[in-house]
Amino acid sequence: MVRARLQDVADRAGVSLATASRVLNGSARQPGAALVTKVRAAAADLGYVVNAQAQALARSRTGLLGLVVQDISDPYFSSIAAGAQAAAREHGRMVLLASTDRQPDVERDAVAAFAAHRVDAIVVAGTRWSVEEDAPVAAELEAFRASGGRAVVVGQPLGAAEVVRPPNVAGAAALARALTGQGHRRFVLLGAPGRVVTARERSGAFADAVRATGGEVVEVVEQEFSRDGGYAAGDRIAEITAAARGEAPCVFAASDVMAIGLIARLRELDVSVPGDVAVAGFDDIPTLRDHVPAVSTVRIPLQDLGRLAVAAAVADDDEVGDAVEVGYEVVLRDSTAR
């Protein structure tokens, strides 16, 4: 069966092609109610399917938002994506998703692809890298903004995009004070290479607060900022624990997924948490609900990060607003019990 064309609808309704286009593609310039009814009835009779690209041109927007995350398999990012999708539906928009496997060049390519597909706004969620690595994606976002799009980042500032910031510094410092309040004094930082800004912010703030409260950071262990990175750190953490001679250290992992990977490896090595070593994380990802032992962490409203980013992306105001930072809550659980 041959698909009906817009010209077929116009002929059936007895109107011009331009009039049929204005009615069916959502133009602000609509004809009278009688003609609108005739065109829509003709389209229904013919089974006409609206051309999304033509509709976008008529409305000056596509109704699409591009969301770029660094690892959709990570519960941190999947929670942000869930919040973004929920908020987009409330605003009558659809979300297109790209996951970059934590590769800055793939992140740049994703932004460029979304811009080429004429999305209304682009949200980039994830830690920032070095200035040199961030420069290409920042340039793509700036070009997108210059063409009339909206750009929002969840994380640290990136070019002139609007920012929704996780409470990395305040949350990590509060967790350190809570753990020293429990009686922990010797800490190991499980972070990532210095180019990973989120891990650097969290680890730095945690270390500063530990020292300010009379505690000591005995070692810093750097691994990939992921579950596998935490797992890979397990052997070194076990060595540190064995050398502690009964004074169990407390490990602060810069993310919950790192903490989960670490605990998995320690279990294989027969190192008890919290008996031999205490472990705390950051984010309070949904998977922690089923984890044993229950992991101490900093709870941040992950879905709200996605919701706030979409709210900024669809706002009518064209000016870039102040950075938005969400709240947090320190949650002490079995993994750091004394």
Image (cartoon, grey):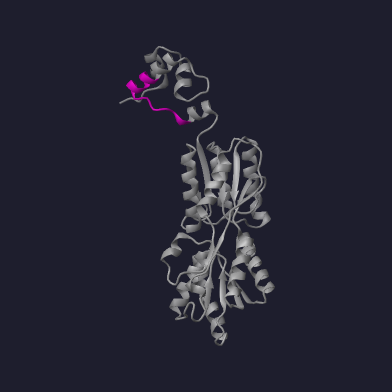
**Is 260 left, or right, of 165 in this rendering?**
left
* Image location of residue 64, percent across then percent down: 50, 38
**Is 130 left, or right, of 241 in this rendering?**
right
Q: Residue at x 49, y 70 (%)?
A: 333
**As drawn, 165 above or below 52:** below
The quarter of the displayed image where residue 222 is located? bottom right
Q: Please identify the residue farthest to the top as the structure is shown.
A: 14
Residue placed most toward the observer, 293 or 149: 293
Q: Please identify the residue farthest to the left as the structure is shown.
A: 1
Q: Residue at x 46, y 50 (%)?
A: 82
Q: Residue at x 60, y 76 (%)?
A: 187
Can see residue 300?
Answer: yes
Q: Please identify the residue farthest to the front as the structure is shown.
A: 181
Residue placed most toward the observer, 63 or 296: 296
Q: Residue at x 42, y 21 (%)?
A: 6
Instruction: Specify whether residue 135 is painted magenta.
Output: no
* Image location of residue 101, percent across then percent down: 52, 56
Magenta stretch, residue numbers: 40-52
Figure quadrant of the N terminus? top left
Can see residue 196?
Answer: no
- The total of numbered circles placed on residues is 0
Assign the magenta stretch its main secondary structure: helix
* Image location of residue 190, percent across then percent down: 58, 70
